[in-house]
Amino acid sequence: MAKKQFKSESKRLLNLMINSIYTHKEIFLRELISNASDAIDKSYFLSLTNKDLVFNKDDFYIRITPNEEDRTLTVSDTGIGMSKEELDSNLGIIAKSGSFDFKENNELKEGVDIIGQFGVGFYSAFMVAEKVTVISRKEGSEKAYKWESSGADGYTITPCEKEKSGTDIILKIKPSTEDEDYDEFLDPYNLKSLVKTYSDFIKYPIKMMMKKRRLKEGSKNEYEEYFEDEILNSMVPIWRKNKSELKEEDYEKFYMEKHFGYEKPLKYTHISVEGLVSYNAILYIPARAPFDFYTKEYEKGLELYSNGVMIMKKCSELLPDYFGFVQGLVDSPDFSLNISREVLQHDRQLQFIAKKLNEKIKIELLSMLKDEREIYEKFYQNFGRTLKYGLYTEWGSNKETLQDLIMFYSSYEKKLVTLDEYVSRMKEDQRYIYYATGESVDKLSKLPQAELIADKGYEILYFIDEIDEFAIKVLLNYKEKEFKNISSSDIDINAEEDNAVFNEGNKELFAFMKESLGDKVKEVRASKRLKTHPVCLATEGEVSIEMEKVLNAMPDNPSDIHAEKILEINTNHQIYEKLKNAYVNDKEKLKKFSNVLFNQALLIEGLTIEDPVQYANDVYELI
C-alpha cells in the first residue's frame, strides 16, 4: 500500500515535538497510558447511552509489554478502538484530538474523565521509538487496521487481524548511544516506576507481567523464577475518596509512599472544593525541615495532577516561599495546561487555587497554635525562620498573613510567645514592645541594657535569629504598638531624675572621652538605663549592633556597615568617680579608661575588639 504523507504543517509539528515540546523522554509513557484510559472511558460513555452495550469494568484494562529481545514496548488497551477512517484522521493530522472532539460532541456524564486535549501526546512516542505501529479494532466492527510510521516520512494503513476491540501501540525502541539510554524503556522495573510516578491514579488497571522469585516447592534454600501478572497503579486516588472513608493511618501511609517525608507528619488537611474552579488537595506539614530546606538548592512546590495524571512534580506557583515547607498535591480538571502537559499556563484558575491554599494553610497553622500548642512549637522550631523571612521579603506585604504566626522567646514567660500574647500583657504605661537582639537567650538575659526595663516589670522579647530584627523593622508595629530595641538611644522608660547625674562637669568629661575614642563612637553620655553595670552601648539610627554583625558577615556585602554607637556611662557606679578624678589629674589615664570601657562594651555585645593586645596592656596598667 502506498505510503501517505503527513500534511506539511503536521510534518513540521512532528519534528518540533520530537525535539522541543517535551523536556523528558519518559513522558511518552504517561501520554500513551492517558490515551488508553480515554479509549476505555469512551467505551464506558457509550455503554451509558446505548442500552445494547454492556460495560463490565473487569474487562477493561491497560497492559504494558516490554520485549528486550525484539526491542519493542507495547501499550494495549481494551477500549473503544479506531476505525480505518479514525486512524487516518486522528493519527494522520497532528494536533487533531479525537478525545477533544469526543468531549465537544458529547455531554459527558459523571465518572467519565476524558484526559486528552491537544492530539499531540501520541507522537511523543517518536522520542524513544524509531518506528511506531498501531493495531486497532473499533468496538462493534469485525475489521481491524494497522497504522505504521517511522516518523516525518509518512505512514501506512493496512488491514490486519485483531481478536477483540481495542488498540495496541507497539514501539520499536531506538538503540542506546553514549549520550542517550533507551534501554531503560525496556526494563520492567523502570517502567513500573514511571507508571507509579505519572499514572498511578489512572482509574483502570495498568497490568504488566513481572518476573519474581520464590522457594521451590519442598526446598529450603533453592529458588525459582516465575512470572506473575501485576497491577502497577493504585487507581483510586486517596484525595478523591470521602474523608469519612479515611483514617489518620491512610493519610500517613500515603505521605510515606509519596516520599514527602520519612516520619509521621505533624499535620495534614484534606481539601475538596466544587465550584467555578474545582480541585482536591492533600497538604502536609512535615515533622522536621529537610536537610537542604534553608539552602538555594531546596525546591518547593506541590505535586500537580490533572484528572489524576501527574503533570508536575514540583509546582512552585501554588505555594508562597514562606509556606514552602508544605508538602502534598493538588488535582484539578480546570488547570489550563500547555501543549506538552508538562507546564501550567499562568491563568486565573491557578492563581485562584494558590490563593485559597494559602488561606487554608494559615487557618490550619492558627488552629494548631490555639489548640495544639506543643505541636505548633515543634513546627515553629523547624520552620519559624521561613515565616520571618516571609515578613521581611516583599517589604512587609505578607504582614497580615504572617504576623500572628511568628513567635519569640519571652523574658517573662521563659518560653516562645506570640506578639498577640505579648501585647495582651503590656502594662498600662507601656508604650513599646521591647526586644533585645543577640546570639542566645542566656546572653541576652544578662545584657546591662535590660536591667532597668526588667525592674520596671516590662517584658522583653529575645531575638536570636539573624532575620528577627530585619523582619520586625519591616513589620513596624503590631496592634499599633511600636517595636523598640532596648539598646536604642532614644529609649524612654520614665527613669527617675536622679538615675543619672547631669551637670556641666560630666559634659566636659564625656566630650574628652568622645575625642579620645574618635569615630569609634558618635557620643559618650550619662546613661538613663543602667543600674549596676558600669557601661553599655546604645545605637542611633536604623542599623543596630546585631544588624551590623549580620550584614558584615554576608559574603556579598560591598562595604563595612556600622551602627552609630553611643557609649553610655553609669554615673551612679564607682567607675564614674574614677573617670572624674582622671579627668582632673591624669588625662592619659582617662584615655586608657575610655578605651577599656569601650572595649568592654563591645565584648558585652559580642563584637570583636580591634586591638586585643592594646586592650590587655591598658587593663594591666590600670590594675
Image (cartoon, rainbow, N blue to C red):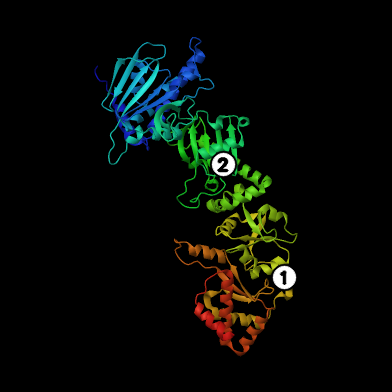
Of residues 520 and 575, which is closer to you in this image? Answer: 575
Of residues 371 and 428, which is closer to you in this image? Answer: 371
- The residue most toward the bottom is 585
Quadrant assignment for the N terminus = top left
What kind of residue is marked 2?
A: Tyr
Q: Residue at x 65, y 70 (%)?
A: 448
**Percent coordinates x, y for residue 576 in the rendering:** 66, 81
**Percent coordinates x, y for residue 109 in the rendering:** 53, 20
Tally of numbered discs: 2
Residue highlighted by disc 2: 284
Q: Is disc 2 placed on a helix, strand or loop? A: strand
Residue highlighted by disc 1: 495
Q: Residue at x 59, y 89 (%)?
A: 586
Q: CA distance from mark 1 to mark 2?
A: 50 Å
The answer to whether 448 is drawn above or below residue 121 in the figure is below
The answer to whether 296 is drawn above or below residue 60 in the figure is below
- The residue most toward the top is 52
User: Can the viewer see residue 428?
Assistant: yes
Give the quarter of the image for residue 245. top right
**Percent coordinates x, y for residue 445 in the rendering:** 65, 65
Using the image, tell me which numbered label, if any, was put on residue 101.
none
Q: Residues within 10 Å of mark 1 (few under 14, many from 20)?
A: few
Q: Residues within 10 Å of mark 2 (few under 14, many from 20)?
A: many
User: Can the viewer see residue 338?
Assistant: no
Of residues 431 and 225, which is closer to you in this image? Answer: 225
**Percent coordinates x, y for residue 305 in the rendering:** 49, 33
